[in-house]
Image (cartoon, rainbow, N blue to C red):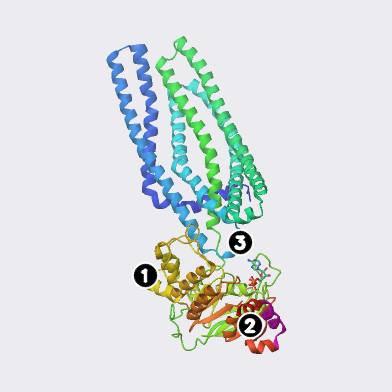
Amino acid sequence: MPSTPSLLSARQTLLPMLRFITPYRGRIVIAITALVVVAGISLSLGQSVKLVINNLFVVQSQRELAVALGILAGLITMIAVGTFVRFYTMSWLGERVSADIRRAVFDHLLLLEPSYFEENQSGELMSRLTTDTTLLQTIVGSSFSMALRNALTLVGGIAMLLVTNLKLTALVLVGIPLALVPVLILGRRVRKLSRHSQDTIADVGSYAGEIIQNIKAVQSYTREAEERHAFGVEVEQAFAVARTRIRERAMLFGSVMLLMFLGICAMLWVGGSDVLAGTISPGDLGAFVFYALMVAMSLATLAEVYGEVQRAAGAAERLMELLQVAPDICDPPEPANMQNRAPANGQMAANASNAIELENVSFAYPSRPKKLALNNLSLTIKQGETVALVGPSGAGKSTLFELLERFYDPQQGEIRQFNHPYRALALADLRGRVGLVPQNPVLFSADVWRNIRYGNPQASDAAVMEAARKAHAHDFIAALPEGYDSFLGERGVRLSGGQKQRIAIARAILKDPPILLLDEATSALDAESEHYVQAALNDLMRERTTLIIAHRLATVVHADRILVMQDGEIIDSGTHTSLQTSSALYRRLCELQFATDELAKG
Ligand SMILES: Nc1ncnc2c1ncn2[C@@H]1O[C@H](COP(=O)(O)OP(=O)(O)OP(=O)(O)O)[C@@H](O)[C@H]1O
């Protein structure tokens, strides 16, 4: 989404950026002081050059030459020290500010609701977190101080030129506006191209990310050649954009150099003639050339830095844009006070007999606003009840779970938890009371301890092991190569489906929520796994309000109530026995879904 840079957007970008820089005012003052001192001393070097040349060619005195060189050496030492201080402080600032921005962006991302991530690819967000922040680091850490130093040298240099020789200065000053023309024209284009370039790189990243994640699918369908080609096209597109950008930058840099040095040649011609005619001293011409070179160099550097600033402005724009995305789902200004922040089982307030209520809830996913995933749904689940959800694929069972975790807000109707409307509850309170055991549990690339403790970070080792025991997971964990210290997840031990589920169940046991959302695995587990998972679930469900997306006969038979869903509506409810006579859809589902169970039973 390339945007046209405007003054307004620049201001909108820079203002929020200030909040990241102001905490380090002190260091900025130190850096700028060092910078001004160095620039001042550099400018005075011209006078030393004049002294050295005049002593050498005009006075021809060995002693005075030594004094002039001594002064020069002293000044150069001061420049070295000043440069160290400036360089260190500015680079420190660059690293610090980009680290702060990285953290702020990540912290902000964690607040955004899942639908944001459906619309924005993770690869692009990653690229913003890494590439864009690195760009900003260069700008704060080096480009900014380079720009400031060179701007100072430019102004000081022109002043010194004027003092040294008016006629020659006039020549240089004609060259400067000429050099500024390409800077302004090309600089603007560089900024636009830079944003485009970053976007295409992000596309490359997300493409590769998706393929790597799904490498098995690619290989099993032997689509390597196609993917290679498609990725090649992406990379070449990114290269083409980058090539245009660097060509513009190179032209920017080259034309400034050309114009400046042509100007200096013209000046040497005029000045050299004056020295030959005896109207100015060789020292004056020497100092003048020194200042003119300084002015030329600083102008060239400014042109280059300008291009970089444009690039970084693009990066900053994207980052600040991201920080300004307001989460749609967030805490209310004054959350309802639920007395027990995490009520233990059976300790609920006496009036909280309804654990979950849905009243005329209608919901469509933001990406498919026309299709109602839940249609005018009303439902009350009493505390301690076990309710099974059954229904054909696409009926809205998982959607109901998503709403109960408040990943989305319904467009119509209200959801309540223990008599409090969802929108009045703090998210941490609301989600703290709901435990989810998903069909495909997520394991992080961390050890077993951390994976189970995700349910409750404060839990002691003993509590983690106790939860694992209750989830019938302790024995297989103990048999892992490093027991509870074994790494799971992406780069760790691969666990079977049943084992993963038991880890997820242990996590939920540790969290100890009053409401439980269970999404049973559809894939058949082997008899032994099934037995352990079922035993673990039975332990977990005891004394909790439980809502299960059921795929197994054993589950529905034990449920207090079964809800039959179709097309986002609850079309029937009752017990297994009553539904078998009252609901045709339920009977059909039973025949289809539970056929395997019956088969297994013999
Ligand atoms: N993130 C999403 N964005 C847009 N539409 C979605 C999204 N997730 C689900 N849907 C749609 O919402 C409807 C309900 O889907 P849901 O996943 O709740 O069904 P389900 O009953 O859980 O089915 P299954 O048993 O196959 O998981 C479907 O039409 C589905 O295509």
Task: Describe residue 450's horizontal placement relative to residue 419 as left or right.
Answer: left
Q: Is residue 290 visible?
A: yes
Q: Which residue is denoted by mark 2 in the rendering?
A: 563
Q: Quadrant of residue 487?
A: bottom left
Q: Which residue is denoted by mark 1 in the rendering?
A: 461
* Residue at image coords 46%, 44%: 140
Q: Is mark 1 within 8 Å of ligand 1?
A: no
The question of residue 87 being in magenta is answered with no
Query: What span is colored magenta in the figure?
Result: 582-592
Q: Position of residue 131 (x, y in %)?
A: 52, 47
Under tag 3, what secondary structure? helix
Residue 118's disc is 3
Crowdedness near tag 1: few (<14), some (14–19) or many (≥20) residues, C-alpha within 10 Å: few
In depth, the one of 471 and 428 nearer the eye is: 471
Q: Mark 1: which amino acid?
A: Asp
Q: Mark 3: which amino acid?
A: Glu
Q: Is mark 3 within 8 Å of ligand 1?
A: yes
Q: Position of residue 199 (x, y in %)?
A: 60, 48
